[in-house]
Image: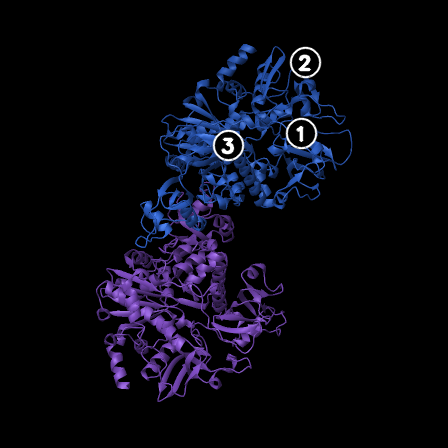
Chain colours: A purple, B blue
């Protein structure tokens, strides 16, 4: 199932025979071809990306910093420190293309909005039992008769026996000063009962923790008030590691070819940038002055590869049969050791994973959905770069993974893009005319996952494509023959955003936003994999979709999904809409729950133990079901009675 | 009681009125006065210390590296790396005196023997339960059906539950390679049951640990076979920290004036040099090739100040009323965090201390003596730079500390020196003639502690000094008037070692080895403090010396001590000789016991809890007893019946 390597939608430029290189910009996932020697600033403009260049591209302002993978000519500059330079940071205005490139445009380098839309369910928690606890101590002053050491004095005030209290060197080193400068009134931060991880003068007003979802594509962090569970601030960004490959397998390949260090540094850079953003946000709201050291615990949910790369662990075992990771249950670590810029001694908890391709993000989804606590059997589908499916109830669970492919995230589709400003996110065909909405409401620059599902469902319902997904209504004024077969125009060039700057033609003309036969084929591959995986999982326990109590849909993609249309194309099963529940970012929700509650951490371990992993790559039934699913909605229309009725009505 | 500051025996040079500076060389504790601009190589020669200078003092061979505290003129040299330079390392041949200096001569810089004589009792242990344990694992190969992560696979082989096994990042990072390169046969090192601190290919042939005694003056390390408890190798050296002050109070003052970092680095340098020496020793014996990483646990005994300085902890609380240390029970730490060059994840255990001036070295003494396990009441005396006394049995213990002063270690005595090669270590006066032995058997260069005790006892018995310690037999041919009062010639200049080079006179003449009224006074102060402390401790529990079952004598000094003569001068109580037991280096013995045995670690904690600390500095009874003890052997000769008989006989 797992294929290595990236496929880029290459804009062919057949008119000239010069030295041309393809440059793909992330996170927009937009590829352009440019001549050798073109600056990245100009290449980005050609891809419709306006970079910050306050100094007019003279290499003086340092605003156009991008991360580059591939060979470029770039002069040294004092505006980029040596570590960032090693990580691939370059000034786009000074950097000239001399090979095929992958370029990541950080949020701060880009003009205009670039927001990842992410929501998650904030569950109520009866049990607040965080990883660390705070205690205020009014220590008795030492005397000749009561001359306990400082540490033993704290130990006694905590009601512990001599020698029970652990404390790392960093804390011991600052302890005497803190105690004496605060006149023996201190707050201590304890991990468990016995580990003193911080000491601060006076009473502690705020107890803060961080929940983090590290996705292959996006990273989201939420600052949590540990006394109430409230989310105080949230920040998200694309994973800078994307320059090392779009999916987990190409990231692992990168580590094999090079080393794990660069991906590790890039994801740490991403996480630490989010922490800075949260600090800025809290400051902007004038609530209080937040320093990294104020955050004294962190819970991380991520897929198995992401966790390996975050920790700089060898991920090779994940890629090859029998797909063995180094660990599914990383022990608790110190933030300082990991490189996360919060309190160095803060414990870093990782939501346990189940297998190489069913990671902690999925167990976090399960926790957030409470699938594991219900008497009724439910299904959970998380479609990201990979697709993961969990089936079960409080007594048993089975899970599997399929490589869904990047079609719903803008990959392998000519005008696909991620769910960002300017993306077409919903589409209707009405009496031959097209109606669409865009994220942010402006002019379109591409189509995101939910838009693509709508588009194909509408084209299918309206007879523009046949059940094999081939464009068949050649009389439709929006259908035409392109370089690679039939294509359908979603938005004419003149409708598209001027600042999209999508220069499809060497003479400088912008092009139309289209979808091609090939694009549709790629989307069908994706939806077929997800549906087939869910079907096989059900069959493995002798159940059918009708037996399900609920279907949870997780992943950033789930926020905009039209269930009805996802059913029409056969991505989701044909069930009453009230059976579907959107989890939003379940990984982040699960990270928050485990950050706050010992009960939830225990439940996460129980899920890990109880879940049976089902390896699809060796299952003939999966390939059979996959083949049957390569149709709209399915070879067996009997499985989609509602869609059949709909087609009968529209037909 | 505690006085800050160093007193050096200054060789006055009244003949000239030039810019003269005093330079004290450690560990020999020899002070010379030299003109500004003199090199340290020449200054050392004047103090009778032959430094390695293979290149003839041209600054090329780098053999004459010494550690300097004070202002010198010294050119930069590539032969000393920046960190060593910061620690005060300089080339003696290139370095010119321009202030009063303290210079530490490392073992390797000195020509000839320089050995610290140290022995310790190797107790049999029925219970071997080290800090870490080794396990050999033949791991089953992973398959698609058994695809546990590497860490979980180890966990299962150890019989642990999922998620129970902790492992630090360093170990996780090397784990996949070690497992696969050894075809799934590995040895793991576990701290407790759940912490994986190392993994190595194949079967582990050796399980090694290190016991270390960190004294104010000397540091001793012993490599221990953790399967048998056997001592495989041992190394000792002077504590390089000595350039920061001779006793704990001057070291603390150094930290207050400057910072804790330099003393910390110097003691780490000392410990790490001992580890290298042990490696060389093991290699020389062609037993096996020992790397630092082979040593996977360490137990450290040291006084409270030494432990603070080793860890870089603020020691100020120790110096001032109410004498509160940061901790008497440092938690277990990682060798890598502390800076000790063994396996970085190796646990560092510290024998707990009781108070600022009764440290882990004394609890280690108690462990080695088994005083704490006996029904009978015993006394333990440890005389080093400080004197510590413990009294008790298995039901109770009291302890106190007195600042004994450095007289027995060569300080505050004109021709005093430490117990090194060339030191006079025993003396007899027979019919007006003197007989002495030296360590190593060669010509004398000074007098060490046991020699000084013998000397004063003999002078007293023979009527050369009166009971106040004043030289009274002015007709004795060895008695004469010196610059500072009466003095007694122990060895004439022509008897002394030529290479001692002791140039007492500006015209280049070597002098005689003498003892002065003032020297004797300093020794009496020391012996009085120790005896008075022991007396007051006994009185505090209504006991007398006669009630004691045993008297344990610990400290390097104890190895050569003549009990009878120590009784004659009133240092030790007048008891039958069979009641005295030499512990040798009890601190090292206790460190070894706690390294090897969980039972002993628990006993150490019990001793810590059960021991009552008695603060002498606020006790009038101590000052009264101290005053009464400022005589030979004591104001009340009735306390020393054997000595009275002896004097009656000789009188």
Q: Mark 1 belongs to which subunit?
A: B
Q: Answer few, some or many: residues within 10 Å of disc 3's Cα (few below 14, many 20 plus, some between 14 and 19).
A: some
- State the CA–CA distance, disc 3 to disc 1: 28 Å
The residue located at (47%, 57%) in the rendering is A255
Q: Answer few, some or many: residues within 10 Å of disc 2's Cα (few below 14, many 20 plus, some between 14 and 19).
A: few
The residue closer to the viewer here, A267 or A496, is A496
Choose top left, top right, bottom left or bottom right for residue A452: bottom left
Q: In which quarter of the image is the N terminus of chain B?
A: top right
Q: Residue B308 vs residue B479: left or right?
A: left
Residue B282 tag number: 3
The residue closer to the viewer here, B263 or A418, is A418
Q: Position of residue A168 (x, y in %)?
A: 46, 48
* In the rendered image, residues at marks 3 and 1 fall on the same chain: yes
Q: Mark 2 belongs to which subunit?
A: B
Residue B50 tag number: 1
The residue closer to the viewer here, B267 or B197, is B197
Under circle 3, the secondary element is helix
Residue B475 tag number: 2
Q: Position of residue B273 (x, y in %)?
A: 55, 37
The residue located at (71%, 35%) in the rendering is B57
Under circle 1, the secondary element is loop
Rendered position, A42 above or below A5: below
Choose top left, top right, bottom left or bottom right for residue A81: bottom right
Q: Residue B491 vs residue B200: left or right?
A: right
Q: Position of residue B84 (x, y in %)?
A: 61, 43
First along the sequence among labels 2 and 3: 3
Under circle 2, the secondary element is loop
- Tag in front: 2 or 3: 3
First along the sequence among labels 3 and 1: 1
């Amino acid at each position: 199932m797992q294929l290595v390597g990236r496929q880029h939608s290459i804009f062919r430029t057949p008119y000239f025979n010069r030295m041309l290189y393809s440059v793909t910009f992330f996170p927009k996932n937009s590829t352009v071809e440019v001549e050798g020697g073109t600056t990245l600033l100009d290449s980005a403009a050609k891809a419709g990306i306006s970079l910050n260049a306050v100094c007019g591209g003279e290499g003086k302002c340092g605003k156009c910093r991008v991360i580059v993978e591939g060979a470029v000519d770039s002069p040294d500059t004092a505006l980029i420190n040596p570590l960032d330079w090693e990580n691939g940071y370059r000034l786009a205005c000074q950097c000239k293309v001399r090979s095929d490139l992958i370029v990541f445009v950080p949020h701060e380098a880009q003009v205009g909005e670039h927001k990842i839309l992410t929501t998650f369910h904030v569950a109520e928690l009866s049990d607040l039992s965080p990883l660390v606890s705070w205690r205020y101590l009014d220590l008795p002053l030492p005397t000749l008769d009561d001359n306990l050491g400082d540490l033993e004095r704290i130990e006694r005030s905590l009601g512990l026996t001599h020698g029970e209290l652990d404390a790392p060197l960093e804390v011991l080193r600052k302890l005497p000063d803190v105690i004496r400068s605060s006149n023996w009134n201190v707050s201590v931060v304890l991990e468990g009962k016995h580990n003193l991880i911080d000491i601060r003068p006076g009473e502690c007003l705020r107890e803060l923790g961080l929940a983090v979802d590290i996705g292959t594509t996006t990273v989201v962090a939420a600052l949590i008030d540990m006394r109430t569970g409230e989310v105080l601030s949230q920040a998200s960004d694309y994973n800078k590691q994307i320059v090392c490959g779009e999916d987990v397998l190409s990231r692992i390949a990168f580590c094999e070819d090079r080393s794990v260090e660069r991906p590790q540094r890039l994801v740490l850079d991403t996480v630490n940038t989010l922490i800075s953003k949260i600090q800025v946000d809290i400051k902007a709201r004038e609530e209080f002055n937040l320093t990294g050291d104020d955050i004294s615990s962190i819970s991380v949910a991520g897929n198995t590869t992401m966790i390996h790369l975050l920790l700089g662990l060898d991920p090779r075992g994940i890629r090859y049969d029998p797909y063995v990771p180094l660990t599914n249950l990383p022990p608790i670590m110190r933030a300082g050791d990991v490189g996360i810029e919060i309190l160095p001694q803060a414990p870093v908890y990782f939501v346990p994973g189940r297998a190489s391709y069913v990671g902690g993000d999925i167990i976090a989804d399960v926790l957030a959905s409470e699938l594991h606590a219900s008497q009724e059997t439910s299904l959970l589908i998380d479609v990201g770069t990979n697709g993961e499916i969990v089936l079960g109830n409080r007594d048993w669970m089975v899970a599997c993974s399929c490589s869904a492919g990047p079609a719903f995230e803008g990959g392998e589709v000519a005008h696909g893009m991620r769910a960002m400003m300017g993306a077409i996110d919903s589409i209707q065909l009405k009496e031959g005319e097209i109606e669409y909405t865009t994220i942010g409401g402006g002019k379109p620059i591409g189509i995101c996952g939910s838009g693509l599902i709508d588009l194909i469902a509408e084209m299918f319902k309206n007879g523009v494509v046949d059940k094999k997904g081939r464009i068949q209504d050649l009389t439709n004024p929006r259908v035409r023959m392109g370089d690679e077969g039939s294509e359908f125009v979603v938005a004419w060039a003149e409708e598209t955003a001027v600042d999209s700057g999508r220069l499809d033609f060497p003479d400088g003309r912008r092009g139309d936003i289209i979808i091609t036969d090939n694009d549709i084929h790629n989307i069908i591959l994706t939806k077929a994999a997800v549906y087939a995986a869910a079907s096989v999982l059900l069959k493995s326990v002798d159940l059918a979709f009708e037996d399900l109590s609920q279907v949870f849909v997780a992943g950033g993609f789930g926020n905009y999904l039209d269930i009805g249309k996802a059913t029409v194309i056969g991505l989701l099963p044909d069930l009453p809409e009230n059976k579907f529940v959107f989890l939003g970012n379940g990984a982040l929700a699960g990270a928050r729950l485990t950050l706050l509650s010992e009960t939830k951490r225990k439940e996460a371990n129980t899920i890990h133990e109880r879940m049976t992993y089902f390896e699809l790559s060796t299952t003939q039934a999966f390939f059979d079901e996959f083949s049957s699913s390569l149709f709209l909605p399915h070879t067996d229309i009997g499985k989609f009675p509602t869609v059949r009725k709909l087609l009968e009505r529209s037909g």
